[in-house]
Amino acid sequence: MANQAQTPDVNKLSIQYGLLIGVVSIVLAVVFRMVDPLFQYTNWWVSIFTLVLVIVLLVVLALDIRKKIGGYWSFGEAFKSLMIIMVIAVLLSTAYNFILFKFIDPGMPAKVSSAMIDKTSAMLEKFGEDQSKIDDATKQFRDGEFEATLQPTIVNELKAFAYALIFYAVLNLIVAACVKKKAPLFAPPLDEGTAV
């Protein structure tokens, strides 16, 4: 019964924290764009940094929710809450990318594709690969295949949203397993609680 009374609070917290993570992601994207419009698309460590930041935020916010609802949280409830958080965060991020590529900088897909050709070619030349291998590795960027996936279309945005949700569902299973905490069946005697 107590759990049902807390559910609206958990959902409300989940929505708030989803908005928080979404806004943090957008602010980071804007900062990276100010440094260099292609920065986040051509530097793999930017993606790693953003992912690590999102994971840390997810864990910290999940622990905060658990604390606010009394310190105990089932795996299922934790997973549901984490999914609400990430659905909102991914929706905001997807909307930002759509607006950026559709209205703010419609030439961005072509710029990203061109930058990827340069970056991939330079990296492979550094490793001493011959031109035929470089051409094979950059084919998707040169033939427009990669650029087409970046175009701001409903299909592309739905695909990006779905892939992100699948990724975060797996991540949320791990986080939920880490933050769940069962309530004890019986309250421990006072001596035990103070002795340990």
Image (tube, helix red, strand yellow):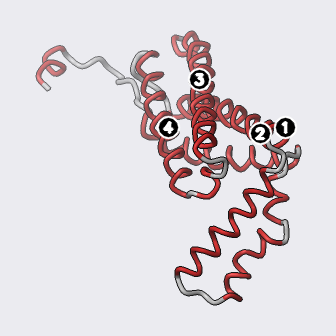
Marks 2,1: beta carbons within 8 A: yes
The residue under label 1 is: 103
Q: Disc 4 to disc 1, how far (Cα)?
A: 38 Å
Marks 4,2: beta carbons within 8 A: no
> Is 31 located above or below residue 70 in the figure?
below
> Is 49 located above or below residue 42 in the figure?
above
Q: Quadrant of the N terminus?
A: top right
Report crowding for label 1: few under 14, some 14 to 19, many 20 or more residues within 10 A (C-alpha): few
Q: Is residue 165 left or right of residue 95?
A: left
Dividing the picture into quarters, in which one does residue 169 lie? top right
Q: Position of residue 6 (x, y in %)?
A: 54, 13
Name, please, the residue furthest toward the right.
154
Foreground mark, 4 or 2? 2
Q: Secondary structure at mark 2?
A: helix
Q: Amino acid at mark 4?
A: Ala
Marks 3,4: beta carbons within 8 A: no
The residue under label 4 is: 176
Q: Disc 2 to disc 3, how far (Cα)?
A: 26 Å
Q: Amino acid at mark 2?
A: Leu
Q: Amino acid at mark 3?
A: Ser
The residue under label 2 is: 100
**Residue at 74%, 40% in the rendered image:** 97
Marks 1,3: beta carbons within 8 A: no
Say which of 2 and 61 sits in front. Answer: 61
Q: Disc 1 to disc 3, how far (Cα)?
A: 30 Å
Q: Amino acid at mark 1?
A: Phe
Q: Secondary structure at mark 1?
A: helix
Say which of 38 and 83 sits in front. Answer: 38
The residue under label 3 is: 14
